[in-house]
Amino acid sequence: MNGGGNGAAMEILMAAGVPRRREGGVAAIMYNLGRELTGLGHRVDYVFYEDLMTPAEMAGRFRDLRFALRLARLLRKDRKKYSVVNLHAPIGFAYGMLRRMLAGGEYPPYVMTLHGLEERRLHVMRREVKKGRAWHFSLGNRLWHRVYHAPRFFLSIKTADFAHCYSRDVWTLLQLKYDLDSGQVAYVPNGVEERFFLRREYDGHKPVRMLFAGTWLDQRGIFYLRDALEALNKKFPDWTLTIAGAGVEPERLKAFFGDALRDRILVSPVVPADRMPELYAEHDIFVFPSLMEGLPGVLLEAMATGMPAVTAETCGMVDVVQDDVNGLLIPPADGPALESALLRLCTDANLRQRLGAAAQERMRHLTWRAAAGKLERVFARALQNGHGNGE
């Protein structure tokens, strides 16, 4: 059985320290890539939290450490079953160390996937702490990061045979800081499902409907979003903002924005995956001022539906958004710049149409089939370089 032009079919294991759910995030990325890799002739297995831990263990503080150790034990037992293993950082460190200590041998090669930079997190959140705009980055959190989180990411990277990442800044730092050769690191952006490519009408109705989608975190630029909306409301009061999938109680979200804005804030706590295209279609502007990301799937989906997006000029966002061509880029942590960008879009339906149409066209080049093809070549290189036990 041949696979996708890269020789024999591969037995691939994909694993990540996340719940097994298809609604979005890491699991959705894995399922989309796995589906396309299966279509190319390979066999793909998945391992998530539920496969190796009880519900009580999944809620524990050391769940990622426990998961990584059990995953390494599983791979030691099933080492002849797989051609290659694709482990999302930081859960690959235990298997990577095991494989290095045993000099590889019959153990399948380890391809590490890194979504975003811990170095970026530290850089951003240290500055936010000084502004009083970080909820979970106290001295204790920073010490815990240094002794627990950072070493696991470091070892996940340094023990990998190859690396796969979603943004150019991660691709660059893996070479400059971690000394990976350029041939060991692949930049493979995520794809977008065909169901998100909608026909959109860019009318000038009021109120203008804005959308923020994703978990409600301090690192997502939410304080600057509040600043921007407070300023926008004085110049253009005919708008609403829907916050979808935040994982926070609606009343708490409204309270965050204060009495002056609360009536303009709409909340959809949970949005089923099959309703996401409809959610985007119901809104006019996508606003995502995150201070740090990898390559956010919600941004790609929104752009695919023809939404004009406002996002920060950092991380993976700059790989897909070209300022004033297919979206608007603003400096990170800049409330006035965000307000100015939103005001432009709220008051100009023609601008929304121009940027939205260009965004949709840009996304047509990002398919899951193309992403899987590139990742397939990474796996094939791992086998061709003499790692593991590919047939």
Image (tube, helix red, strand yellow):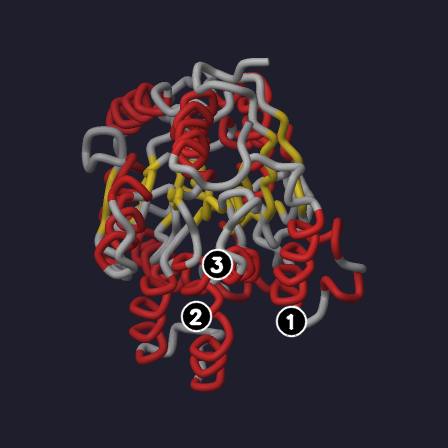
Left or right: residue 46 versus residue 159 is right
Q: Label 3: how many residues lie within 10 Å, few (<14), some (14-19) or many (20+)?
A: some
- Residue displayed at 62% across by 55% down: 247
Residue 309 numbered tag? none
Residue 62 numbered tag? 1
N-term mark: 2 or 1 = 1
What amino acid type should be assigned to the residue bearing mark 2? Ala
View extreme (bottom): residue: 139
What amino acid type should be assigned to the residue bearing mark 3? Arg
Q: Name the residue under label 3.
A: 100
Residue 150 numbered tag? 2
Left or right: residue 84 versus residue 382 is right
Which of the 4 quarters of the picture holds residue 274? top right
Q: Position of residue 231 (x, y in %)?
A: 30, 57
Q: In what quadrant of the picture does the N terminus appear?
A: top right
Give the CA distance from mark 2 to mark 3. Answer: 20 Å
Disc 1 is placed on an element classified as loop
Give the CA distance from mark 2 to mark 1. Answer: 14 Å
